[in-house]
Image (tube, rainbow, N blue to C red):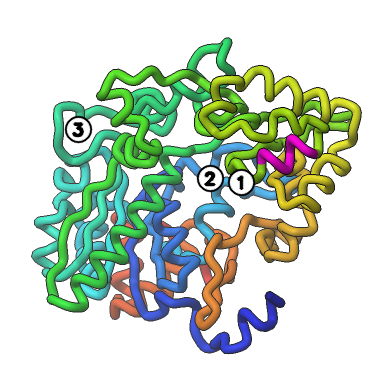
Amino acid sequence: MDKSDFFAEAREDLTGPLAGIRVLETTTTWAGPMAGCILADYGADVIKIEHPDGEVIRRLPPLIPDSSSTIPNETVNRNKRNLSLDLRTDGGRALFLRLCRSTDILIENFRPGTLADWGLGYEHVRAAKPDIIYVSISGYGQFGELSDRVGYDPVAQSYSGFSSLNGNPEGGPVKAPTFLGDDLSGLHAAMGAMAALRHRDQTGEGQHLDVALVDSLFFQSNGLPTAGALGIDLPRWGNQFGIAAPVNAYDCTDGLAFAGVLLDSHWRTLADLMGRNDLAGLDLLARLSRRDELDGLLAGWCAGRSVSEVVGTFADLGLPACRVNTYAEAASDSHIRSRDMMQTVEVDGQEIPLAAPAVNFSRTPVRIRTRAPGIGQHNRDILAELGVEADEIARLIDEGAIGPTPAG
């Protein structure tokens, strides 16, 4: 399909399918901001509440060269507005609750009980806005034996069982190179919020959503928790694949190709390609029992060929294969670019490419509209929407309830 055909009936008058929805996000670092990022990308008006001193993500590497910002901050806080507010002050709490009255979804990822201690838990917020959707993200959840523990992404990866199977077979447990638990819990939080929004629109009922990093990783484990509970052996496969053979990352003359087959029909094609028609009749279970032998055959076939030859030959035959890319290579790849998966924003006078929203909407397209805002960048606009007068703003600044409001 041509891209212009896909977007032939696209509307240009909306920010996305969630246009008109307001989200209040009081979060730090990644899981909570990721949930807010998804909703903001989809067109919601996401107001990030940030302490006037700034949250930790503004200091996390990698840094953008010749800029005061960081790649993590620009990645996960784009498309949002920013209000600098100290929720531990009386004035900050009062403003927050005023904002809640015009809010559809609230996202927070503090340690369970923290916002309640500040007078901003679900019961407090519900009193101000009965139908609000209050999304709490934490390491272990709002209840359970470990719910009061601090839980960060790599801890959740280890506790959930994920790390135990990640890495090479001969090595030990390895965490993912990305914030996998944060990303998945942020994704589940956003999906849960949209489901709760649908329920609210049908019934008028708000509710409290409890999203845990551990639960999100546990759920997204392809049934492995069930296998573990039943005492089934779970080996670490590395680049091989437990349900298919041969599959691996294979050395070529100029790099690595990831290739392999799952279907019996694909195996017959591959066996013919390697000149081993005597093995073409092996079904999946037979191939799994001869995994090392078949892996060696495909490794030998790839060894004398370039990556492009291996990938091209597989593509011509309808078999799956690709180059094992670095992120730098993937970011500059022509297919990634043709999908508009790298979109630019201006940051301190330079164009910075960011990974774009992963879903294309044919009728209500989404995109990266704005870079991550500065601390308190939208104080004046948001406070004006609340009807806060200039003298009250000055008083709240003096009290430390809000940060300085940038001019403009």
- Name the residue carrying label 1: 70
Give percent across and percent down for residue 16.
Answer: 48, 77
Say few, some or many: other residues with alpha carbon within 10 Å of mark 3 (under 14 / 14 to 19 / 20 or more).
some
Residue 400 visible from this viewpoint: no
Residue 252 placement, left or right of 219? right
Q: Which residue is labeled 3 in the image?
A: 147
The answer, for residue 201, to whether it is visible in the render is yes
The kind of secondary structure element at disc 2 is helix
Q: Nearer the viewer, residue 26 or 380?
A: 26
Q: Amino acid at mark 2?
A: Arg
Counting residues from the start of the chain, the first of labels 3 and 2 encountered is 2
Q: Which residue is mark 2?
A: 58
Pointer 1: residues within 10 angstroms few (<14), some, or many (20+)? some
Residue 322 at x, y percent in the picture: 74, 43
Residue in view at x 69 percent, y 24 percent? 295
Residue 76's spot in the image, x, y percent?
51, 53
Query: Magenta residues, as a range?
Result: 267-272
Name the spot of residue 42 as percent of width and height, x first: 46, 69
Q: Is residue 393 above or below residue 228?
A: below
Tell me the mark number nearer the camera, choosing from 1 and 3: 3
Residue at (29% x, 18% y) in the render: 231
User: Is residue 123 within the magenta segment?
Assistant: no
Q: Amino acid at mark 1?
A: Thr
